Each structure stands twice: as structure tokens, then as C-alpha cells.
Amino acid sequence: MISQFVILSQHGDILLFKDYRGDVGKESPELFLQKIRDLSGGLAPPTFHHDGIHYIHVKHSSLCFMATTRSNVSPFMVIELINRVASLCKDYCGVLSEEAIRLNFPLVYEILDEVIDFGYPQGTSTDMLKAYMENSPVLVREGTTPGLFGAERRMVPSTAANKSIMGTAVSQGRKNEIFVDVLERLTVLISTSGSVLRADIDGIIQMKSFLVGIPEIKMGLSEDLTVGKEDKRGYHSHAHVDECSFHESVDLSEFGQSRVLTIHPPQGEFPLMKYQASGDLPSLLPFRLFPTVNDQDSSRDMELVLKLRCDVPSTSHAVNVMVRVPVPKATTSVSQQLSGPGQSVEFKAQEHLVVWSIKKFPGATELTARFKLAVANRTPSSRLELGPVSLNFELPMYICSRLQIRFLRLFDHEQSYVPYRWVRYVTHSDSYVIRI
């Protein structure tokens, strides 16, 4: 059982405080924040004990969801409850942000009343709770939307994240829609010679359902998809994953033969399929870097030339590309020469870092940046302080694993409607590092 449930902003403001049992003091949020600030770098473990109270917290987007208890409960159970409450808030408010919580305070408070009774978890089904919700959501039209797998992103590629389950039914006359996002996180390490030391993909097919009734959905994945140790002949031209798992609503009876999933989706957002792939990827890596360092000059200046090539097809592009280059600690200034518009460079002296930003990078093109580093008291070891280069980027409508959704069909004999179906592909850099 839990004693309190608290939602905090990224600045430590208390957005919502719910006391279920009265056995923990109301100063617990302040003590929790103070405990976090006392830790080095503010990196608090998800659960810790202080003065007879267990603090369990999870960060979602820019918000911190925290629960307290004096009981000897399973921390994994409480973490799962917190994650489920966060999902419910997103389903009913449309987007999980500080503004959404403030605008929908009565609705979120009502969700906590229904989900937790005197500290004991009750039903957490999005569809089941709709029958008991009396408050209508206030939709957030503008503002920063949480990015993929919890990262803050600048791009809002779809309106799906801003739609409320209740808002769709109330304000839009139960418009039937279903959103499917194929999202991949890419982890890559490239050596100084250009060889790939590591290439991993963490992927997820995320579904958000606004459908009426209980329809049956048929989703066809790539016919040439191979899983695990299956036949890999022609592997480099086919989609491949090392392992995968599916949501409980998925029927896999046709998956082995025809790569078709049968789904009875619940209301709200849920992970339909999670998968991982590593080793040789079926497609080219999205970026290649060709660095050149000139530190032979007797002056204190060091010249660095970066040629960055985007190897995605010409019909695709990357957005919000950020190239981070660690420079020697003795660097006093940086001058640059860029190959085109839509680019900028920032020298962060305190972090000894040069950041090259590219708003939009078309596929099958190459950009060049030339940096001149003024290094005080340059020594032969200054070269060793240069790099490695790390890249952050997003690739809309591009997937490195080549996993594709062939079709998305809906069957419901009791309802006569044609739902709106939206499918999106996005690749997001998790860790893309190139040694120079």
C-alpha cells in the first residue's frame, strides 16, 4: 500500500499532492527534493529509504511521479503503478507535460481517486475508467511535446501525442482513429579507421487506439522479416531482428507463416511490439564522418575539418542534427567556416565543446565544417583531447532495420465505419559516437 502520491515539475514545484493514509508528513515532497539535491549530480536511485519512509519515484518527460509508503511493499509493484498512472494521465490529458497537469488538475485528481483506494491499487484500464470520469479534458494545443522514449525533442511530427482519449469522444463525436508509430533508437560506435565496432537497434511499435467497440485488427509486417536464428540468406537485403516481444492483446497464430499480427487493441496507448537488433544492420548507417586534423603547424592553432555524409535515400532527410566535438581544455576560441545555410556553431568554453547544429540534412548529401581552434600552450598531447564526435539526430519516415508495415486492416461486423489510420516511422539517435 502507498501513503502519498505526488507529481512534481522539473523545477521542484508540487503540481499534485494526494494523501491516502495520513501516516506520512505533508513535508515529504520537500524532504524528497532535498535528498535528491544532496546526491552527487542529482542522480537519485528510483527508490530509497529515509527516516522510516520509502520514497519511490519515476521520471516521465519533464515530470517526476513520486509515491511514499511506510509499508514493506514491492518497489517494482509501485514503479509499475506509477508508470500506469503516467500512461493514464497521457491518455486522458492528451500530452504529458507540466501545462497539461495544471490545466487538467481536477481530471488527474479524479484519476487518482479511481485508481488508488486508501493506498491500494485498483483497476488501471484506460477503457474501464472512461465510464467513471466526470471531468472533460482541457487539451494543450501548443508547447513542447515529449520526444521518443522519454527524451525532450523540438520536433512535433504528429498530432497523435496531443489527442485525448476522452477529448476524441466528447469534442469530435467519437471520431475513429488509430495511430501506429514505428520508433527506433540507434546505438553506434565507429573506430578511427571507419570500421563499425557496435551497431544496435532498440525498436518499438507503439499503437494508440481511438476506435469504437472491440474491433479486430490485422497488421502485416515485412514478409521477409527474420527473427533470431532463422534463415538469414539474403540477410543484407531483408529486415531482421534478433529478438522481439508482443503485447498481450496480440494473437501470433499467423505470425510464423505470413508475418501477420491479429490485434484486439485496448483503448489508449500501448507498446504493440518491442524488438532488438545488433551486428550488421540490413541498411547503411545513416551518417558517415570523414575527419581531418592538422596540428603540424608551429602556431598554436589547430585545424579540424569534418565532412559529414548523410547516407539515407535522397527522398528522406534528417532533422535537428547536432554534432558535438570535445576540444582540448586549453582552447580559448574557435572560428568556423560552413558549407551552406541552415547551420550554426556554438563553442561552449566551460564544457570544452564545439556544437555544430544542422536544422535539416537531406539524404545522399554531404556537408563540411572547417574549425580553427586557438589552443594556448599547445602540446603533442592536445591532439589526444580532440574527440570523439557524437551525433544527435532524428530521421522521419526512415527505419534502419527495414521493418515495414505492409497493411493495417480493421474488421468489426457490429460497426459500419471506416477508421482513419496513421502510420509513422522515426529513427532517433541514442548514442552515435565516432572516434577521430
Image (spheres, rainbow, N blue to C red):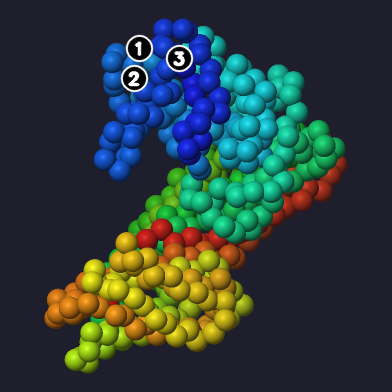
**Label ID, residue 26:** 3
> What amino acid does circle 3 point to?
Lys
- N-terminal of the pair, mark 2 or mark 3, is 3
Q: Image point 51% across, 35% down: which residue? A: 9
- Disc 1 or disc 2, which is closer to the eye? 2
Left or right: 131 as drawn, with respect to 236: right
Write down the residue under mark 1. Answer: 71
Foreground residue among 305 and 231:
305
> The N terminus lies in which quarter of the figure?
top left
* Label 1 to label 3: alpha-carbon separation: 17 Å
Whole-percent x, y for residue 166 in the image? 73, 33
Q: Image point 58% across, 65% down: which residue? A: 396
**Label ID, residue 54:** 2
- Dot 2: element: strand
Residue at the bottom extreme of this rendering: 297
Query: What is the crowding at mark 1: few (fewer than 14 residues within 10 Å), some, or many (at least 20)?
Result: few
* Label 2 to label 3: alpha-carbon separation: 14 Å
Whole-percent x, y for residue 138 in the image? 73, 34
Image height of 365 relative to 409, above or below: below
